[in-house]
Amino acid sequence: MTNLGSIGPDLLQAARDLQEDTIEMRRLVHADPEIGLQLPATQAKILDALTGLGLDITLGESTTSVVADLDTGTPGPTVLLRGDMDALPLTEDFVSDFQSKNQGVMHACGHDTHVAMLASAARLLSENRDSFTGRIRFMFQPGEEGYHGAQYMIDEGVLDGVDRAFAIHVVTNMPNGLLATKGGPLLASADKFEVTVHGKGGHASAPHDCVDPIPPAAAMVGGFQTILTRDLDPSQSAVLTVGHIEAGTTNNIIPPSAFLEGTIRTFDESVRAKIHEGVHRIAAGTASNHRCTCTSNIIPGYPVTINDQAQAELTAEVASKLVGADGFLMAEEPAFAAEDFSYVLQQVPGAMAMLGVCPDDVSPAEAEPNHSNLMQVNESALYNGVGLYAAMAMAG
């Protein structure tokens, strides 16, 4: 057992000593990915990794979540450390000894590394529980990829008694081993919108006898962009992307309806509401101008992920002690990806940090991004993540 002492080189070395176990766990999870809220194989691997650590373990009722508490027996804060577990509906095309064996399912967002790093942090902390006070809660969460898994766990009490929370997400387009965070908005909200334009179908040679829904659907694609360029303050950032359009069956039929859907990303709840209103307004007005009607619907997704400023500064302080000032970056701009850790940060102060896992043979700009079928994780610095999880638990 390593005497951790204070946060710094000794702690990082203790994390490095677990590197072989961390990589083995990551590869086991990577080869057997699961989607959604029910991940029994992944849950079993986590339980096996936690066996013998003296943790109080609670299994989810509505999902296959795992909550493991480490109680030092001495007064102190309760710190939650979160790692998400689920994969994506994607066929992996990068060949390796641990390539996904489940057709059409792949850990293309790095959640396999999150599970492995958190499991190793649980081992490190449990074996050194005399080095800190209070309680650590390890939150192994299913269903981050659009299934609102964090909210299910919150409803089942994962945040009860928690004083602060912390999470890590790996990013391939960051230098390997680099840790980064920022205060305030870190990641965007993510909502889905759907519009169905209703017209009157008929023969394509006689459009005057029909009410063609395709021209208004096409006009909406450009019209929605005016929300960003004319409704919002130029200093406010947002993305609205139409990602799917569908209408008709063949060349000589005007269809009775047309469908389009897309995503809305913002860093501000008031901007989010303004874009929602704009989508409904422009869809209805454009349809009406073409003698059509429409139905528009917005399916709320994850809120803005907002780091508590004090917790972001604590993360910066801890990470700099752990890996040195050159190994940490205080980011200036948020990213348009979204995270359901946002639900946790709405209720308790906390922060999420990013860990770079760019492969050695490419630059961060050239690396296959998260969610790519060719995504590769550089495993060599995963101990930085293990160390940061442990350090944030010990930070008081």
Image (spheres, rainbow, N blue to C red):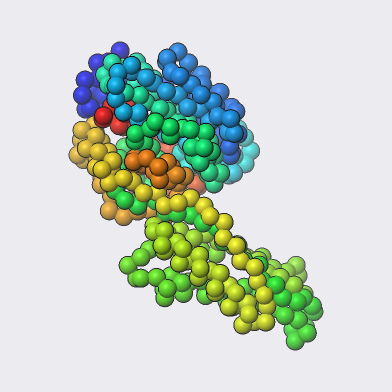
Residue at 29 percent of width and 21 percent of height: 75
Q: Is residue 113 visible?
A: no
Q: Position of residue 280 (x, y in %)?
A: 56, 69
Given residues 360 and 245, the one toward you in this image is 245
Q: Is residue 75 left or right of residue 49?
A: left
Q: Position of residue 211 (x, y in %)?
A: 72, 80
Q: Position of residue 11 (x, y in %)?
A: 26, 24
Task: Name the image quarter holding the N terminus.
Answer: top left
Residue at 46 percent of width and 74 percent of height: 226
Determine whether 20 is above or below 339 in the image.
Answer: above
Residue at 50 percent of width and 70 percent of height: 278
Given residues 104 and 305, the one toward you in this image is 305
Q: Is residue 339 left or right of residue 14?
A: right
The quadrant in which residue 8 appears is: top left
Determine whether 114 is above or below 13 in the image.
Answer: below
Return the residue found at the far bottom: 208
Return the residue found at the far right: 203
Given residues 194 and 77, the one toward you in this image is 77
Determine whether 52 is above or below 164 in the image.
Answer: above
Q: Is residue 183 left or right of residue 268?
A: left
Residue at 65 percent of width and 71 percent of height: 294
Task: Name the image quarter holding the C terminus.
Answer: top left
